[in-house]
């Protein structure tokens, strides 16, 4: 590789190390726990996540309904599974329930699996959960680009309905009214009934379970 290296995406998980997806001289490479693996399956790949100690998930942002745009690799860089994971992939988180993918509006208002807004896949590519199909009277997700993993599912927010939504893989949802100024946030973390929400350089601490107001926890603009 030459010296011009672009870090496309990275992921770190406790006890599983860190992984980086990098681009150099129009080629993509995976750096994982001291190994460098060449990846030549797509002209542009967008992200990387660690599934477990032995597997990585790689995906490409596509709009044209390509038959394959997601790959599961083993620790040697060999492809174990590949499948179509939807168009306009906006965010990916992984936990023991599966690979959760949220889609941008180009996918949600397009065609195929991405019109479900939020989908959970197994690492083999089997669909385990579809938000729009399996959740009745659910808050509307028109652009699912912020997500946080939980033990049994994921947390997302609905800017249209103004709700913080906990989606369980079994189809159950819990939702909470979300302060309007926290909608359209850039990142979200949930811990013990408290949401840490990043928006416009500020991080807010919001104890939503106690129905308390959100306050600035950290201000990066100062």
Image (tube, grey):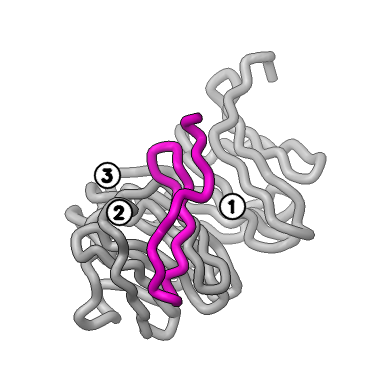
Q: Is residue 163 above or below residue 60?
A: below
Q: Residues within 10 Å of mark 2 (few under 14, many from 20)?
A: some
| Residue with the mark numbered 3 | 64
Q: Secondary structure at mark 2?
A: loop
Expressed as whole percent of the image width and height from the top left, the position of residue 75 reads: 74, 53
Foreground mark, 1 or 2, reads 2
| Disc 3 crowd, CA 10 A, few/some/many (<14, 14-19, 20+) | few
Of residues 60 and 14, the one drawn nearer to the viewer in this rendering = 14
Q: Of the residues under marks 3 and 1, which one precedes in the sequence?
A: 1
Answer few, some or many: residues within 10 Å of disc 1's Cα (few below 14, many 20 plus, some between 14 and 19): many
**Residue at x 38% of width, y 63% of height:** 213
User: What is the number of the mark on residue 49?
Assistant: 1
In the image, what residue occupies the spot 24% across and 76% down? 138
Can residue 124 be seen in the rendering of this structure? no
**Residue lying at the far right of the rendered structure:** 34
Region in magenta: 197-222
Q: Real-space Cα distance between discs 3 and 2?
A: 30 Å
Q: Is residue 12 visible?
A: yes
User: Cβ–Cβ below 8 Å for labels 3 and 1?
Assistant: no
Locate residue 3, reporting x and y percent.
Answer: 68, 14
Of callouts 3 and 2, the N-terminal one = 3
> How far apart in space, not on screen, are marks 3 and 1 (Cα)?
23 Å
């Amino acid at each position: 590789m030459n010296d011009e290296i672009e870090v496309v995406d990275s992921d770190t998980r406790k006890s599983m190390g860190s992984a980086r997806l990098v681009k150099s001289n129009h080629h993509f490479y995976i750096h994982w726990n001291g190994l460098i693996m060449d990846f030549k399956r797509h002209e542009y790949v967008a992200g990387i996540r660690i599934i477990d100690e032995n597997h990585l998930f790689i995906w490409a942002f596509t709009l044209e309904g390509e038959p394959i745009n997601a790959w599961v690799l083993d620790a040697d860089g060999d492809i174990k599974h590949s499948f179509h994971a939807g168009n306009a992939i906006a965010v990916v988180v992984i936990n023991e329930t599966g690979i959760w993918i949220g889609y941008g509006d180009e996918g949600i208002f397009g065609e195929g699996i991405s019109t479900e807004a939020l989908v959970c896949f197994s690492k083999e590519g089997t669909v385990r959960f579809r938000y729009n199909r399996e959740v009745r009277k659910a808050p509307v997700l028109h652009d699912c680009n912020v997500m946080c993993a939980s033990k049994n599912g994921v947390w997302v927010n609905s800017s249209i309905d103004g709700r913080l939504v906990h989606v369980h893989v079994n189809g159950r949802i819990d939702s909470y009214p979300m302060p309007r100024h926290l909608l359209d946030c850039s990142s979200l973390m949930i811990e013990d009934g408290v949401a840490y929400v990043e928006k416009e350089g500020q991080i807010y601490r919001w104890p939503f379970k106690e129905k308390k107001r959100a306050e600035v926890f950290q201000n990066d603009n100062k």
